[in-house]
Amino acid sequence: MLARVLRLGSEYTALDRGRIAPFDRLQGTPVNGSLKLGSVFGITIRVHFLLIVLLGLLVMQAHDALLAALLLVMGFGIVLLHELAHSLVAMRFGLRVVDITLWPLGGMARMSTMPESSRIEGLIAVAGPLLNFVLAGLSLPVWLWAATSDPARPLLQIVAGQFLLWNLSLGGFNLLPAFPMDGGRILRSFLGRKGNWVLATLRAVRVGRAVALLLALFGVLTIPWLGMQSILFIFIALFVGWAGTQELSAVRARHGEDPLAAFREFAARATGWSQTQPASEFARAPQPQPPPPLSGDRGEDAAGFSEKEVERLERYRGPLRSYRPEES
C-alpha cells in the first residue's frame, strides 16, 4: 500500500516563484497545515497534516497494524533521506535550506535561492536519486541473505525487500524528465548549459507536460486494475503541469519577459506600490487618509467643494461638463 505513495515524485523548489527571498523572512514561514518534527543538520523537518491523516487511514486498514506502521515510517524515512541529499548538496554550494516538508505527494525541500547554473542544479537534482540507488545497492545483500537463510526471519525479509523496492522506485520515478521533478531539472541543466535559462526552462516544461499527459493517460486506463494508485498518477500529472508552468513564469519574470510587466509598472506608478514588496503586505498597510471636507464657502486656495457648491450640484440636472459652480 505504501508503494502507492512512495512512487510519487519529490522535488526541491525555490520560493516566491523563483525570485530570491531573504532567508531570515522565509525561516519563520512554515508550510500551511504542517507540523514541525525537529531539525537535522540545521534543517527544519515538517510533516503535513494531510500526510498524518493518510498514514493513519493506511494503518487502520492494514491486517497487521504494527507492521504497516513500521513500513510507513521506513518508507517516508527514505523520502526524507532523498530530500536531505538534495539539501546537503545545496548547502555544499552555499545555498540555504529553509525546511523539508513531507506531504502526501512525497517531499519538498525549500531553498532561499536557486542560482541559474547548470552545474549546480544538475548536481543538486541528481543527488536524491543517486542516494536511493546507493541505499538499494546496500540493501540487496541483506535481502538476499534473509531470503536464502533461516525461514524464521520473515520480518527481516519483508523489511529488506520493501526497502530495496522503494529505493529503486523512488529513485527511478524521480528521473522521469517531468519538470520540475529531478529528471526534469537534470534535463534543464543540460539544456541550459549555454546560458539561455529561459529557453532551457521552456523546453524542459514542454517535455514535462508531455510526460504528465502520458502519466494521466496511464492513470485513467489502469483505474480498473490499480484503483487508487491510478488516481494518484493523475494527481502527479496535474501537479507536474501546474508546477512547471509556475516556475516558467518565475524564470520569465526574472529575465524581464513577464507578460504582465507593463501592468505591474502601471500599478506601481498609480498606487505607489513597490514591485519588490509582496502585494498582500501592501494591501494590509495603512493607507493615507483623504483631507477632511471644508466647511463654509471655498476660498481661492482651498481644495474641494463648499457646502453651497455641493447643494448646487445636487439641484442641477443639466450636463455637468457645461456647468460652472460660479453660476447661481
Image (tube, rainbow, N blue to C red):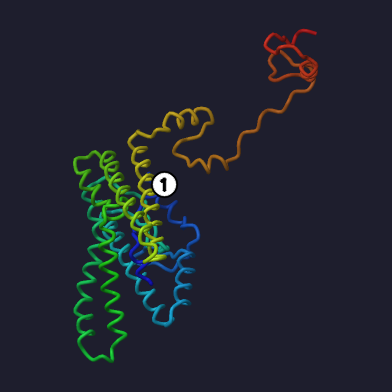
Determine if residue 12 is in view.
Answer: no
**In the displayed structure, does residue 26 sit left or right of residue 306?**
left
Q: From the image, which quarter does the C terminus lie in?
A: top right
**Foreground residue among 176 and 78:** 176
Q: From the image, which quarter does the N terminus lie in?
A: bottom left
Element carrying mark 1: helix
Picture quadrant where residue 84 is located: bottom left
Question: What residue do we see at 23% from left, 76% from top?
Answer: 139
Picture quadrant where residue 299 is located: top right
Picture quadrant where residue 217 is located: bottom left
Task: Give percent across and percent down for residue 26.
Answer: 43, 53
Task: Give percent across and percent down for residue 148.
Answer: 20, 86
Question: What residue do we see at 24% from left, 38% from top?
Answer: 196
**In the displayed structure, does residue 269 sit left or right of residue 93?**
right
**Foreground residue among 242 and 188:** 242
Task: Give percent across and percent down for residue 152.
Answer: 28, 92
What residue did someone put label 1 on? 16
Task: Give percent across and percent down for residue 27.
Answer: 43, 56
**In the displayed structure, does residue 324 sit left or right of residue 46?**
right
**In the displayed structure, does residue 14 sit left or right of residue 302?**
left
Q: How many marks?
A: 1
Determine if residue 213 is in view.
Answer: yes
User: What amino acid is found at the position of numbered circle 1 in the picture?
Assistant: Asp
